[in-house]
Amino acid sequence: MRLLIIEDDRDAADYLVKAFREVGHVADLAVDGEEGLAHALDGQYDVLIVDRMLPKLDGLSVIGTLRGKGIETPALILSALGQVDDRVRGLRAGGDDYLPKPYSFSELLARTEALARRRGSREETVYRVGDLELDRLSHQVTRAGDEIVLQPREFRLLEYLMKHAGQVVTRTMLLENVWDYHFDPQTNVIDVHISRLRSKIDKGFAQALLHTVRGAGYMIRDSK
Amino acid sequence: MTALGKLLRTTAFKLTLVYLTVFALFAAFLLAYFAWNTRRLITEQITQTVDAEITGLAEQYRQGGIRRLVFVVDARSRRPGSSLYLVTTRAGEGLAGNVGSLATGILETSGWTETAYRRLDDPDGAAHHALVRVFQLPSGFRLLVGRDLEERERLHDIILAAARWSLAIVIVLGVAGGFFVTRRVLKRVDAMTETTRKIMDGDLAGRLPVAGTGDELDRLATNLNAMLERIEALMHGLKEVSDNIAHDLKTPLTRLRNRCEEALRVAEDESQYRAALESTIEESEALIRTFNALLMIARAESGQARDGMTECDAAEIARGVGELYEPLADDKGIHLKVEAPAAAPVHGNRELISQALANLVDNAIKYGSGMNGADAQIVVTAKGEGDRILLAVADSGRGIPVTDRDRAVERFVRLEQSRSQPGSGLGLSLASAVARLHGGELKLEDNHPGLKTVISLPRAGSAPPA
């Protein structure tokens, strides 16, 4: 994955570049908005990681300009401003995801990979992982041909996991996308939902599909 | 600016001048109209009388010729009064009448003219003014009949004097009145300005004087005082928040630092260092969460979140939060149910209300079981009551004794019985701040047994939050 990081804080920027490199991605760096815009217009990037507060040209304007020129590269906004209205403003400016600081790298990584994947895929109506099938139109879930009955919320949870099959999905991402909540519940509320889902789709089957990724979140994946 | 200068520049004084001018003009107009009409009336009377006389005299002439005319005019001339008569030959020689001398050329005119004249019996006296009519008789004689205008002129003088006096009085009274009124207003405004200056210099407790007259200055002062009250409260809150944050974050920060220091001192192998680092990350994350929560509370209390408000349904919010926490409750053997059958519209920030309710449910799960494990239940309700919407979380746990309830809502307070559980102690504070932000309140009640926490909010469509 090719990433462009637009961040003026040298320490944070170096940290990110190194961290992404360690997991096998390539990351370019721009230290102000104008440089960032120039790079984004030229290069072919999979995801842009844009700090909101930048010298010369702020992050939201960079994204707005790109969108105005028809460049749809997914952009993740990093910002110290973490309230819901700030998030809404960021997304309205053309951003695709919004992560308030301070963040953990695993969160950033999971969201970046989710954005990169989104760019490639078309909208499918049936998700498949191993022998697990989810039909988005009929809301039917089957595994090895047998139907599994899920509550509406469980269905949405599974749908989101399968949409990002093979990628790490953090608890925050789940809370935001499946429940539309942007606060931190401070307890393991999500974990319990996941374990209920797991008992419905994995119990009794030889192969577990829903995995816990320590320190990051969850992933649904065919372990073959 | 001199005191007089300030006075003259006030709106009140300018207004007084405007009114003064308008009133003076109006009075002048009225007097002028009156004067003009009266003059016209008098002139009309004179012309009518004179015309009648001339007609009569002309008749005399027709009947008895010049001899008769002279005789009659002579007789009439001897009568006292302001009537004037004169009969002359074509050449201008006087034959009868009481007119001594006339302005030149009058006899040649026809119709009405005003002229100066002297009476026959008072040839060296002052000249008078008269309105006369000259009538040409067929044989070349001329007849002049007129009337002295002394009456008219006297009336004119009276009215002029009246006008001058009244104008003078109006102006003097107006200006004097203006001065007094303006001075009074200025004094009140100056008092307000003085107080404002003191307040700006730092005396936040200062308030504007309210005279008690209920006029617009009073209303302004009352409203400004309310605003000052709010500002003082906000400043106070701000100071409190920064004090609290400074104090309350120092403890976990110190703990963090101590752990790291200890690790450096004590740890010997990599696994110990690793463990120390991992625990440091955990502590920092807890610290970040605490900080975010404090920030959220501060924002809620300072009213900053007001712009994110929309029409929300409290019933929907209750269902959402209930559904999120139901598995967790179930895992702990607590039965959680939501009772929100009817729509409960509120004008608010959906995110904040959800978070507040989530905090309450979280608390209920943490502390709300333990009396009779099997019967443990949590009921989340959303219903309307009058002009309020009540969002409530009722548990069947230990509850909070009445004496502790006020304290429990304060930041970072963990009551004795809860110290063993993880948590920051900010849940109730946030819920309370959110409730207040929406113009409502958080109440803690006894659930017999257990605790019932209620967020009371104004129903959408009723009066907006203060």
Image (spheres, rainbow, N blue to C red):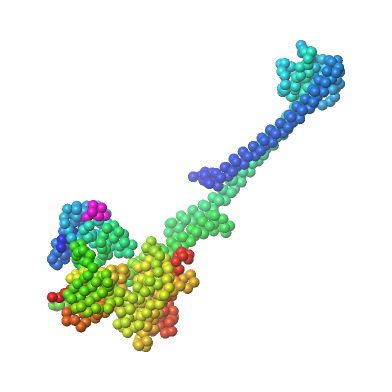
**Number of numbered discs on residues:** 0
Q: Quadrant of residue A130?
A: bottom left
Which residues are drawn in magenta? A64-71
**Does residue B443 belong to the magenta stretch?**
no
Estimate the x, y position of residue B47 in percent, counting from the top left. Answer: 75, 27
Most foreground residue, A66 or A8: A66
Q: Residue A198 vs residue B170: left or right?
A: left
Residue for point 44% across, 79% down? B445
- Against B91, residue A56 (above or below) is below
- Against A25, residue B274 (above or below) is below
Most foreground residue, B357 or B315: B315
Residue for point 55% across, 47% down? B12
Estimate the x, y position of residue B234 in percent, counting from the top left. Answer: 41, 64
The main secondary structure of the magenta stretch is helix
Estimate the x, y position of residue B214 in percent, counting from the top left. Answer: 57, 58
Q: Residue B253 vs residue B134: left or right?
A: left
**Does residue A70 belong to the magenta stretch?**
yes
Most foreground residue, A111 or B247: A111
Asked whether residue B203 appears in the rendered view, the answer is yes
Residue for point 60% across, 41% down? B22
Estimate the x, y position of residue B237 in percent, counting from the top left. Answer: 40, 66
Q: Quadrant of residue A100?
A: bottom left
Asked whether residue A14 appears in the rendered view, the answer is no
